Image (cartoon, helix red, strand yellow):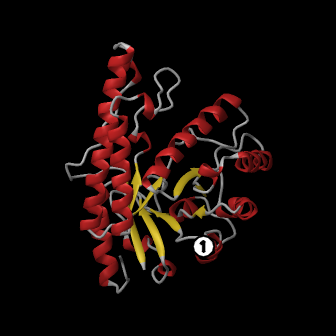
């Protein structure tokens, strides 16, 4: 059975998460800017409840949570902890309500940190900020009950073998709170499934198989074989990514995402699997509604 996932924001629904810039916060005194951040974090926690309710009402079984649900949480100049915020208790309570709702409604949640989160980096400052961001997201993931914090392999820095070795070493050192949720994803520029599956197997880290990325950056594996190998890395329901090229497969830059999913891009091999498929399409909930209808028409079971 396929569980479709919505990524972070909505296209047409009036469900809006809020962010703020460090420049704006720096124009206020410390206590005032903590009050602003607290209001934003509480608003976003409450908005998450509304988003999850929408998912439950519309046959969407997974929601990827916006990385900046706590805006600027690890920013070097205006970063903070939840305990610093005047609304701390209410924020925590709202997250716990989200967790209880997810359990009751069988809604899965995940995180996908921004591209600047790189564990294979040779640069200590980049690594330090990456670990701080993963620690923050693991904190929220634990409160909400999210089981996936997904990252890419990062750059190759002129030597893919050495970069993968650094990645492995950093995974080994991660705290359990992060490591038990960490997943790796193949990308469309540097790391194929074939590159990452050995790392995943060695460290018991699941692979989030992105079939669009694999089609843009192929290796010796077929979609079917990559799917099988990726599924073997999971000790829970596998989570994969799906998108379609903006201008089709025969045009330049097929890595750019389309507004919708072309049903022909949904691998036939996936249709009989128990699988979470996060839909990376620009029309968000509208694209999922269309894809869901098309899958059901084909006889695919969608939860």
Give x and y (percent) for residue 5: 39, 63
Relative height, residue 104 to residue 120 (above, below):
below
Q: Can you tell which quarter of the image residue 42 is in? A: top left
Residue at 74 percent of width and 63 percent of height: 198
- The secondary structure type at the circle numbered 1 is helix
Decide if residue 183 is on the left or right side of residue 203.
left
Give x and y (percent) for residue 72: 44, 31
Q: How many marks?
A: 1
Q: Which residue is mark 1?
A: 231
Q: Alpha-carbon neighbours of circle 1 within 10 Å: few (<14), some, or many (≥20)?
A: many
Residue 228 visible in the snapshot: yes
Relative height, residue 222 to residue 123 (above, below):
below
Relative height, residue 53 to residue 270 (above, below):
above
Which residue reaches farthest front? 89
Give x and y (percent) for residue 175: 66, 47
Give x and y (percent) for residue 275: 48, 73
Residue at 40 percent of width and 37 percent of height: 70
Decide if residue 278 is on the left or right side of residue 201.
left
Viewer-proximal residue, 29 or 86? 86
């Amino acid at each position: 059975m396929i569980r479709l996932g919505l990524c972070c924001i909505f296209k047409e629904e009036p469900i809006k998460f809020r962010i703020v810039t460090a420049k704006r916060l720096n124009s206020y005194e410390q206590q005032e800017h903590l009050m602003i951040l607290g209001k934003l974090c509480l608003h976003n926690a409450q908005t998450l409840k509304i988003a999850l309710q929408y998912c439950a009402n519309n046959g969407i079984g997974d929601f990827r949570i916006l990385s900046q649900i706590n805006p600027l949480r690890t920013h070097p100049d205006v970063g903070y902890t939840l305990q610093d915020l005047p609304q701390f208790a209410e924020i925590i309570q709202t997250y716990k309500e989200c967790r209880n709702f997810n359990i009751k409604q069988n809604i899965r949640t995940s995180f996908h940190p921004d591209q600047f989160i790189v564990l294979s980096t040779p640069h200590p400052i980049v690594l330090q900020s990456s670990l701080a961001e993963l620690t923050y997201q693991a904190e929220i993931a634990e409160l909400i009950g999210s089981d996936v914090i997904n990252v890419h392999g990062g750059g190759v820095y002129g030597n893919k073998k050495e970069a993968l070795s650094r990645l492995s070493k950093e995974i080994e050192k991660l705290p359990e709170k992060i490591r038990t949720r960490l997943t790796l994803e193949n990308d469309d520029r540097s790391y194929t499934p074939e590159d990452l599956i050995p790392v995943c197997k060695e460290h018991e880290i699941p692979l989030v198989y992105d079939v669009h990325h694999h089609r843009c950056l192929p290796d010796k594996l077929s979609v079917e074989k990559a799917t099988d190998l990726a599924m073997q890395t999971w000790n829970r329901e596998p989570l994969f990514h799906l998108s379609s090229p903006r201008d089709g497969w025969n045009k330049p830059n097929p890595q750019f995402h389309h507004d919708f999913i072309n049903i022909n891009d949904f691998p036939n091999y996936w249709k009989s699997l128990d699988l979470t498929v996060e839909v990376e399409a620009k029309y968000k909930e509208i694209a999922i509604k269309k894809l869901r209808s098309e899958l059901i028409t084909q006889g695919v079971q969608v939860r």
